[in-house]
Amino acid sequence: QSALTQPASVSGSPGQSITISCTGTSSDVGGYNYVSWYQQHPGKAPKLMIYDVSKRPSGVSNRFSGSKSGNTASLTISGLQAEDEADYYCSSYSSSSTFVFGTGTKVTVL
Amino acid sequence: QVQLVQSGAEVKKPGASVKVSCKASGYTFNRYSIHWVRQAPGQRLEWMGWISTANGNTRYSQKLQGRVTITRDTSASTAYMELSSLKSEDTAVYYCARDGGSSWEFDYWGQGTLVTVSS
């Protein structure tokens, strides 16, 4: 069960928009609408930001949005802010009731 | 409010076993499954397995199948993860996370437990 593929790093200036991709296969990302995204600050537990591809939990800023096309899901952060600097991980339900995480993306606010 | 509180850090020798607990509060324990996720130093998140707190059914990652056991005690609202035959590569922070219930996401997380495997 291989990890989902994410870019190692993405950067942007305050106020800009950035997009993080998450590429899997038809057995995970492409096969189910159960992709979620997590934000992790150093030394902290991950925080759920997006679930079911594009739904936002209560309390998460609407600057965060998600989408999916084929085997690739994406997380977009608009109006980038300094507090958005963190690691981001995608996750997907996979066949046989298992789960897989992405390789992780470090977001830097320039 | 929903809280998952994990047991404290552990230091183990190679070949030993470790058991980490995750005590839930603020919700009805047996209505939401619990997952275990680990993160080696500077590495990505790795899903380990999950347990249905309602019936005790489990599912484990292929990589850890045979070495990991997840159990629960509904009377104590606590889930446990035991990892055996420890290797240095098992040094990591271990997290429990609640399954959201309606979809397959991890909506609340424990604070993490550092397990160090060293001779």
Image (cartoon, rainbow, N blue to C red):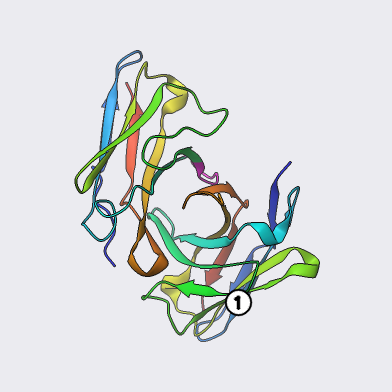
Q: Please identify the dominant SS of the magenta region.
A: loop
| Residue visible at 59% across and 50% down in the picture | B109
Q: Quadrant of the N terminus of chain A?
A: bottom left
Tell me where residue B92 appears, x and y as whole percent.
49, 63
Which quadrant holds residue A54? top left
Q: Residue furthest top?
A: A15
Q: Amino acid at mark 1?
A: Val
Pinpoint residue A97: horizontal percent, then vertical percent: 41, 66
Nearer the observer, B27 or A15: B27
What SS does tag 1 mark? strand
What residue did someone put label 1 on?
B18
The residue closer to the viewer here, A29 or A105, is: A29
Q: Going 36% across and 76% down the picture, which residue do you hit?
A: B62
Q: Image point 49% across, 23% down: which residue? A: A61
Residue B23 shows up from this direction? no
Quarter that holds the C terminus of chain A: top left
Residue that appears at 38% across and 45% down: A89
Q: Residues within 10 Å of mark 1 (few under 14, many from 20)?
A: some
Q: Position of residue A75 (x, y in %)?
A: 32, 34
Q: Position of residue A101 (x, y in %)?
A: 36, 55
Q: Is residue B94 visible?
A: yes
* Residue B28 vs residue A1, the one in the foreground: B28
Q: Is residue B79 above or below residue A44?
A: below
Residue A60, placed above or below residue B26? above
Q: Does A53 appear in magenta? A: no
The stretch in magenta equals: A40-47
Q: Chain of mark 1?
A: B
User: A80 and A92: which one is in front?
Assistant: A92
Q: With respect to residue B51, does A53 lie above or below?
A: above
